Amino acid sequence: MKDLSVSREFYEKLGFVFLAGPVGPKPIAIMEHPSGVNINFILNAGAECTENVIMDVPEKNTGYTHVALEVTSSESAKNSVKALGIAITGEVEFEGAKFFFIRDPDKNVIEFHEPAHS
């Protein structure tokens, strides 16, 4: 993580609450969303990274690419995210399902997913 205060502000916009940090021998910070989603942030990262090493480089590394949050209306969620001043970095529709993506200050991807309606 480049800057805890910047990331904390970003995630608070999305409804997360700061719980603790830095804590532990390999310091982390912890935030939690009222829905129960809990995020642990690495605070002792090495050199500043300008790319997401899972998503943005041609050579693929082991790891998960992003978290996906299900929403009932992608349009409503998109409007809410835009109103917070957060850029939409991608959008996809596939077999009736709708997806859009944002990036946090450290280039981590967050997906919002509206399932196809039967």
Image: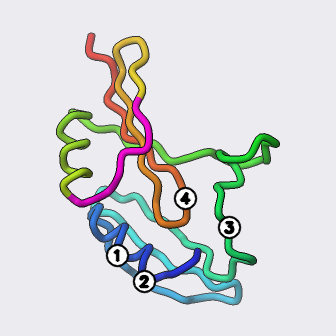
Relative to 30, say whether 60 is above or below: above
User: What is the distance, in whole Å, between disc 4 and disc 2 at their CAs?
Assistant: 15 Å
93 horizontally vs 66: left or right? left
User: What is the distance, in whole Å, between disc 3 and disc 2 at their CAs?
Assistant: 17 Å
Residue 85 painted magenta: yes
- Counting from the top left corner in percent of width and height, residue 107 is at 55, 58
Which callout, 4 or 2, points at the residue further toward the start of the chain?
A: 2
Q: Amino acid at mark 2?
A: Ser
Q: Residue at 29% x, 61% y: name it.
A: 14
Which callout, 3 or 4, points at the residue further toward the start of the chain?
A: 3
Label pair 2/1, CB-CB below 8 angstroms: yes
Which residue in the protein does label 2 denote? 5
Dot 3 crowding, Cα within 10 Å, few <14, some 14–19, many 20+: few
Residue depth check, mark 3 versus mark 2: number of the one nearer the observer: 3
Q: Amino acid at mark 4?
A: Lys
What is the secondary structure assignment of the residue under circle 2?
A: helix
Which residue in the protein does label 4 denote? 107
Q: Residue at 42% x, 72% y: name it.
A: 31
Which residue in the protein does label 3 denote? 49
User: What is the distance, in whole Å, between disc 3 and disc 1 at their CAs?
Assistant: 20 Å
User: What is the distance, in whole Å, between disc 4 and disc 1 at their CAs?
Assistant: 15 Å
Residue 61 painted magenta: no
What is the secondary structure assignment of the residue under circle 1?
A: helix
Name the image quarter holding the C terminus: top left
Q: Which residues are magenta?
A: 84-91
Predominant SS of the magenta segment: loop
Q: Amino acid at mark 3?
A: Cys
Which callout, 3 or 1, points at the residue further toward the start of the chain?
A: 1
Label pair 3/4, CB-CB below 8 angstroms: yes
